[in-house]
Amino acid sequence: MNTMSWIDNELRALEDESLERTLADTGVSRSLPGHLMRGGQTLLDLTSNDYLGLSRHPDIAEAMRGALRAKCGSGAAASRLLTGNRPPYSELEAELAAWQKKEASLVFANGYMANLGTIRALVGRGDAVFSDRLNHASITDGIILSRAGHVRYRHNDVEHLEHLLKKSDKARRRLIVTDSIFSMDGDSAPLHKLVELKHNYGAMLMVDEAHAEGVYGPSGEGLCHAMDVHREADVIMGTFSKAFGVYGAHITGSRTLIRWLVNKARPLVYSTALPPSVAAGIFRALGIVQTAHDRRNHLQEISGRFRQKLAQAGLSVMPGDSPIVPVIAGSSRDSLRLCEALERHGIAAPAIRPPTVPAGSARVRFSLSAAHSDAVLDKAAESIVSAAEEAGILA
């Protein structure tokens, strides 16, 4: 008897519903910024979250090489609470705290681990977490693992959130958690209203700035700084795998919060630290991000222009001002057909299907980068319209 045969049945069901995911080997184009290599073909890369185009920045690569040459080792070889806490970490965390205008910061392996560890450290049985329905999966999983009450409010609906807060008077502690920029829709959270509700109901406020850091704020600090509510956010999470072009994540807040996480955030306590060379690369990227005003301005301009061109052509484009530009296809099969047509036109962009997005709202998610020029994106917009017509998405 094959006790694993059920997996074949489940995979067939996924395949029949156009929901099976697969891995494809992908490389970067050495000669064309903002392009990738796949299947022997050069494609315009509208898939990655490399918002500032820093993932191949030579200064960042050199900082990482320098750390390796300085005998930091290829890996930390232990958790940070043992012997893995190398000097690049302390230097980076001090700079992060100053950048965010907070007391302290703590680096994690990635955003998923940062959200899991932080939420589980802040709440537990008898507590309640109020989470936007479109928050990232790492937030959802962190709430589930915490065993706190999981209270989901309608996307960006502050009236619904307040209604739920009013009903939670028996909760020991309350935590409101939201993405600042939502990764699959590209819109932003009503942070001013969330701050108001935090104060009115004695809740903690945690903001996931993964898709906003580097892109928004005077020096790329994120949407909290752009909206001047960073002092009110108790917990700020950001990642280094998107606009920074490296890898890892941070939690930034009060010294008390960071002391608590050092003791209670299980992904930090029980995981080997990031390689010191990665921390050195992040440190260099942070310096570049803070002064990347031209890149941010260019990204903002091309995002608005690209979104407008697709909408004017009749495509169903979700509103927003971020470099995330989703085009709704409808069914999973339609989104896959559009992806295939786009690839024939030399464009790589991912089909986003359930359960990542609600049924009936499958889409192709275009993600722009400061590495893209006006001319390249203007041509891409024309190709996207042609591909949508071929795929039957646009009449």
Image: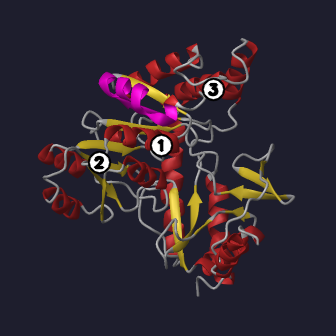
Is residue 100 positioned above or below 340 on the image? above
Is residue 318 positioned above or below 219 on the image? below
Is residue 177 positioned above or below 155 on the image? above
CB-based contact (under 8 Å), mark 2 and mark 1: no
Residue 147, image x, y percentages: 35, 50
Q: Nearer the viewer, residue 374 or 243?
A: 243
Residue 315, image x, y percentages: 53, 76
* Mark 2 or mark 3, whichever is nearer to me: 2
Dot 3 corresponds to which residue?
Answer: 281
Q: Residues within 10 Å of mark 2 (few under 14, many from 20)?
A: few
Q: Which image quarter holds the C terminus?
A: bottom right
Could you give the CA–CA distance between mark 1 and mark 3, rounded to whole angstroms?
A: 19 Å
Residue 24: in magenta span = no
Residue 140, image x, y percentages: 42, 55
User: Bounds of the magenta span?
Assistant: 250-268
CB-based contact (under 8 Å), mark 1 and mark 3: no
Q: Nearer the viewer, residue 129 or 278?
A: 129
Task: Look at label 2 and name its amino acid.
Answer: Arg
Could you give the CA–CA distance between mark 2 and mark 3, rounded to whole angstroms?
A: 39 Å
Q: Secondary structure at mark 2?
A: loop
Question: In the image, what residue occupies the spot 47% across and 50% down?
Answer: 138
Q: Is residue 2 left or right of residue 314?
A: right
Q: Residues within 10 Å of mark 1 (few under 14, many from 20)?
A: many
Q: Is residue 386 left or right of residue 116?
A: right
| Residue ranking furthest to the front | 1
Task: Look at label 1 and name its amino acid.
Answer: Val
Residue 297, image x, y percentages: 49, 43
Question: In the image, what residue occupies the spot 56% across and 80% down?
Answer: 331
Q: Where residue 215 is drawn, which disc sits there?
A: 1
